[in-house]
Amino acid sequence: MKKALFASFFCCALSMAPLTLMAQHKVVAHRGYWKAEGSAQNSLASLRKAAEVGCYGSEIDVYRTIDGVLVVNHDNKIDDVRIEDTTYPNLQYRRLANGEYLPTLIQYLQEGARYPQMKIVLEIKSHRDAAREQQVTDDIVKLVHDLGLQQQVEYIAFSRVVCARVHEVDPQAKIAYLNGDLSPQEVKNLGWTGIDYEKGVFQRNPSWSREAKELGLEVNVWTLRGEDDIKAHQTDPNIDLFTTDDPDVALRLTQPVEETPKDKKSKKKSK
Ligand code: MG
């Protein structure tokens, strides 16, 4: 009798417990969470804000000045000065939209190390020629290793030279290709770990996200903007990562949903 009572109580308790459905898509803040108050694209504040709201990763763009300083900026020029052709003293007092000085990569990584739960998705920007691209890649990978951040940094690049160099100097590193002109199989054959393609690429090649998953590649799509755009991509279970200008919206939409048996019943009824 006691046993029967316990069993029925246990079943009842179990049926009342909320079931947690895991979120499928991880959120990467494109150039950091720059829409937050007090933030700006690629600023240290944008990195902090991305971590504070719980992003999986914060994306940044990195160039190397001609005197060998790694700086964080999206465009290849600042006020008509091309970053890779100038020296750091010509840039160091430039201010971002939120008043911060232009960050160097070392400043950025040291700040990122305070948030070890968040990945730094580090875009190594295309430079003028292959020699410069190899140099900037070597310098970045060395700095990441010197700071012991290999597990926290994931690399992305448009340049095949850069991707190949990352793979050569750090075969354990994650490196995703951005340019959208290689099939998943071609990326796999090169030994790179993911595709990180503009959303139009997946529309033109609707089988690529599935093929990539089957090959064990990580799949990232950019740049999602606004609720409708994010929702439209949630229907593809083969996409792992959303790179977005609206990480707050993406996080809200991709949070694990708690579904109770009552929800399930009403869903069934509405079918
Ligand atoms: Mg970028």
Image: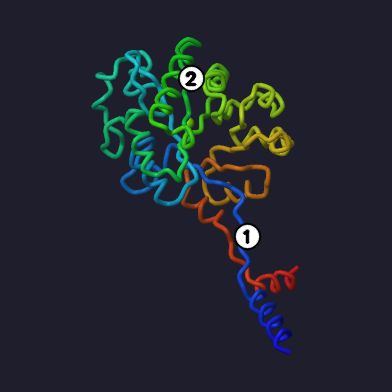
Residue picked out by circle 1: 21
Mark 1 crowdedness (10 Å alpha carbons): few <14, some 14-19, many ≥20? few
- Residue 126 numbered tag: 2
Q: Residue 78's spot in the image, x, y percent? A: 34, 23
Q: Is residue 116 left or right of residue 201?
A: left
Residue at 47% over, 40% down: 119
Which image quarter: residue 171?
Answer: top right
Residue at x 74% of width, y 70% of height: 268
Along the viewing direction, whichever of 108 and 94 lies nearer the viewer: 108
In this rendering, is residue 240 above or below 128? below
Residue 126 vs residue 37: left or right? Answer: right
Identify which amino acid the numbered label 2 is placed on: Ser
Count residues near mark 2 (Cα–Cα under 10 Å), then give few for <14, some for 14-19, many for 20+: some
Report the side of 50 relative to 261 (left or right): left
Alpha carbon separation for disc pair 2 and 1: 40 Å
**Residue 131 location, x and y as percent?**
47, 10
Of mark 2 and mark 1, the one earlier in the sequence is 1
Going by the numbered disc 1, the residue's amino acid type is Leu
In front: label 2 or label 1: 1
- State the image coordinates of residue 244 (x, y, percent, origin top left): 51, 42
Rendering coords of residue 73 (x, y %):
38, 28
Residue 240 in the image: above or below residue 131: below
